[in-house]
Image (tube, rainbow, N blue to C red):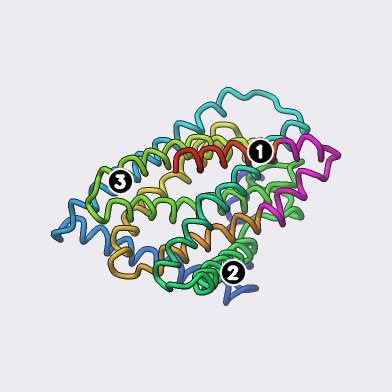
Amino acid sequence: MPTESMTTAPAWRTEFLQHVRQHPFTALGLLAALLALLVMLTQSLWLAIFSDSGILLRWALVGGMAAFAATSLGALPALALQGVSRRWEDAMLGFAAGMMLAASAFSLILPALDASALLTGTALGAAGIVVGGMALGVVLMLGLDQFTPHEHEREGPCGPGHEQCNRVLLFVFAIALHNVPEGMAIGVSFSQGDTSVAIPFTTAIAIQDVPEGLAVALAMIAAGFRRVNSVLIAMATGFLEPIGALLGVTLSSGVPLAYPIGLGLSAGAMIFVVSHEVIPETHRNGHQTVATLGLMVGFALMMTLDTALA
């Protein structure tokens, strides 16, 4: 007779295929988005190797790797955490939510409005582009919601007793997603070949990525993931920074509209998940005060980093 551990993987595959059958259009949309990303990334790598602008792409890749290293460095302190009470779990989730709300406003929406204004020449047109990107982010997260473990499942990556697993997985998706346009911003800064602008800008983003890496790890630990796995996944989210950096250099000359739309998409995804999933979860256990205080501290910290290093 097969053991429980032997049947877990097939059960996951069966559930995934059921999601695909139940939501075929969502599955096709996610697949199309992934293929488009792979095509653009392949184009960037080809140009980095064979084109005259390859030096700019290689510099952008170095900048993206620096941001990836900063995210990884920020996640490492989470390894030292031992047993954490539910009260502190909610406080940590609130802290992570606050950081992401501030990052959405100051790192994503405001730069997106500035970039859109340069393209359209009007404030209304700029707002329309950003709002459209935010709407795409919401649609994307609703689609991803169909393919993440849900509370009714008997087993999942968080284990029993951690009903917030689905919410935090969406939160991590949103944070990882926001690293793509953040990396694109690094690539755009290198696209003009002016290192006096690009290096300080990349340094500022790398510094911001340190607490972001910690926020991801803390959120996953609070959801019941193993400490080591939480840190590794937090590090992995930072790997999207160099990918975004390569895309940023290529798209800045070919499809400049992709940059503000990407920023708006990431902002919409994060705001949606924080409001729809994370904040309600932190208020379910009677810890509203510490969760709200954690959110305010996280928001203030990220706002300070974003504005002081801008």
Tell me the quarter of the image containing the C terminus.
Answer: top left
Instruction: Name the residue carrying label 2.
Output: 135
Secondary structure, mark 3, is: helix
Amino acid at circle 1? Phe
Circle 2 SS class: helix
Using a 10 Å C-alpha cutoff, classify the residue at mark 2 as few (fewer than 14 neighbours), some (14 to 19) or many (20 or more).
Answer: some
Q: Give whichever of discs 2 and 3 has the lower sequence position.
A: 2
| Numbered circle sitting on residue 197 | 3
Can you give x and y, in whole percent of width and height, for residue 165 in the image?
68, 47
Position above or below: 239 against 252: above
- The residue segment tinted magenta is 274-293
> Is 235 covered by the magenta stretch?
no
Q: Quadrant of residue 297?
A: top right
Residue at (34, 52) in percent of width and height: 245
Task: Identify the disc placed on residue 95.
Answer: 1
At mark 1, the secondary structure is helix
Q: Position of residue 103 (x, y in %)?
A: 55, 48
For the residues marked 3 and 1, what is the alpha-carbon distance in whole angstroms? 31 Å
Q: Nearer the viewer, residue 136 or 190?
A: 190
Marks 2 and 3, how far apart in space? 31 Å
Q: Toward the viewer: 176 or 163?
A: 176
Q: Nearer the viewer, mark 2 or mark 3?
A: 3
The picture quadrant where one finds residue 301 is: top right
Query: Which label sits in the foreground, 3 or 1?
Result: 3
How packed is label 3: few (under 14 Cα within 10 Å), some, or many (20 or more)?
Answer: few
Q: What amino acid type is highlighted by mark number 2?
A: Ala
